[in-house]
Image: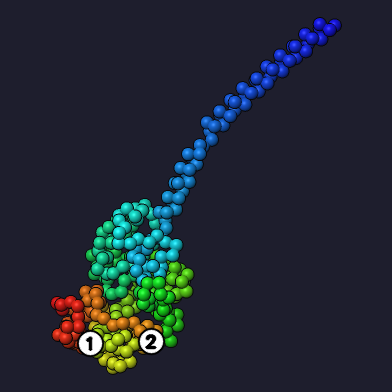
Amino acid sequence: ATRSQNQTQKSTSTMTMISVATVATAVLALTATAEAFAPSLTSIRSAGSCKTQLSATSETIVIGGGRIGSLISDGATLLGRNDDLSTSIPADGEGPIFVATRNDVLSGIVDDCPASRRKDLVFLQNGYLDDFLASKGLSANTQSLLYLSVTAKGVQPVDGITTVNPEGLTAATGVHAQAFADRLAGLGLKCNVVSAEEYRPAMFEKLIWIATYMLVGTAKDCSSVGQAGSDHAQLVQDIISELVAAVSAKEGITFAEGTIERLAAYTDVVTDFPCGVKEFEWRNQYFYDLGDDACPIHNGLLRECAEKGKLGFELP
C-alpha cells in the first residue's frame, strides 16, 4: 500500500510540473504576441513628436520684433530679421501671419514667404499699400489700420479711443480680421472688424491724417502732432479738406461727414507723437502724384520743406 501511495505521489508531482511548464510557455507566448502588437516607447515618442509638429503648423506667427510686433507677439512665434522665412514658416500650415515691419522690407517678406502661405499675411503698415499688394497678387489679404500709439518698445500702448469715436478707430478687414481683433482685445485694445467697402475710406482717412499732421508739423517746426493741430489748426483743416476732395475725385470714395473732427480728436489722444515726413513713397507721394491742381496746398508745403532741407529725400 505504501509503495502504491509513493507511485501515486510521484505521478501527481510529474503532472504538476508539466502543467506549470505548459502555463509558463503559454504566458511567454502571450507576452510575445502582446509585444508584437503594442507600440514601442520609440513609437510613442515619435507619435508625440508628430502631434507637436502638427500643432506648430497652425500657430500664429508675427514677423517683426519692433514696437508693434513685440506688443502683439504674446503666445505667437516671433520671427525677426535673422530668421529665414522660407523655412521658419510651415508651408503646409494655417493661421494668421502678422507683418509688423517697415514698409520698405515688405517686398522681401512676401517673396521669402512660402507661396502657399502668402494668403495668410496680415499687413499692419501705415500708408498706401494698394499698388504694392496688387503687384503681388495680394489685394484680398487681411489689412489693419492701427489707431494706437506705442512710443517705444515695451511701453504701454495708447488706444485710439476718442471723444468722437468711443468705439475706437482701429479697424481690420479680411479673413484674419477677427483673429487680429481678438488678439488686440486680449491687450485691452479695441478693433472694429469691417467689410472691404467700409475699410477703403477709413484707410484713406488714416493716410490723410499721417500726410497732413506730419507735413504741417515738419514745415512749422512743431515738436508734436498736438502742437501742429493746435498752433496751425486752419492750415491742417485746409489740407485735410483738400485731400478728402482729391481722393473722392480720384477713387470715387464717399467719406462720412466729420473727417476733420475725427482726426482732430485722434490727434488729442496721441498729442505727444513726434512729427516727421517719412516713407514718402508710401504716404505723401500718393497725394503729390495727383498733381498741383488737386493738391496745391499739400504739394506746395512739401516743396517748401524740400527747399529748407527738412526732408530726408528728394522729391520726384
- Give amino acid for label 1: Ala
Q: Examine the rendering and report whether any part of residue 215 can be seen.
A: yes
- Which quadrant is home to the C terminus? bottom left
x%, y% of residue 301? Answer: 20, 87
**Residue type marked 2:** Asp
Q: Which sits in the foreground, 106 or 257?
A: 106
Secondary structure under the numbered disc 2 in the rendered image: helix
Q: Which residue is mark 2?
A: 268
Q: Dividing the image into 4 quarters, which one contains the N terminus?
A: top right
The residue depicted at 34 percent of the width and 78 percent of the height is 202
Residue depicted at x 26% and y 81%: 276
Q: Is residue 303 visible?
A: no
- Residue designated by label 1: 219
Could you tell me how many numbered marks the image carries?
2
Q: Is residue 84 above or below residue 173?
A: above
- Count neighbours of disc 1 (C-alpha within 10 A) and say few if under 14, some if 14 to 19, many if 20 or more: many
Given contact means CB atoms under 8 Å apart, are the residues at marks 1 and 2 in contact? no
Query: Foreground residue, 95 or 193?
Result: 95
Q: Is residue 96 above or below residue 39?
A: below
Q: Quadrant of residue 118?
A: bottom left
Secondary element at image label 1? helix
Of the two numbered discs 1 and 2 on the same chain, state the one appearing first in sequence.
1
Q: Residue at x 27, y 74 (%)?
A: 128
Give whichever of 310, 89 is nearer the camera: 310
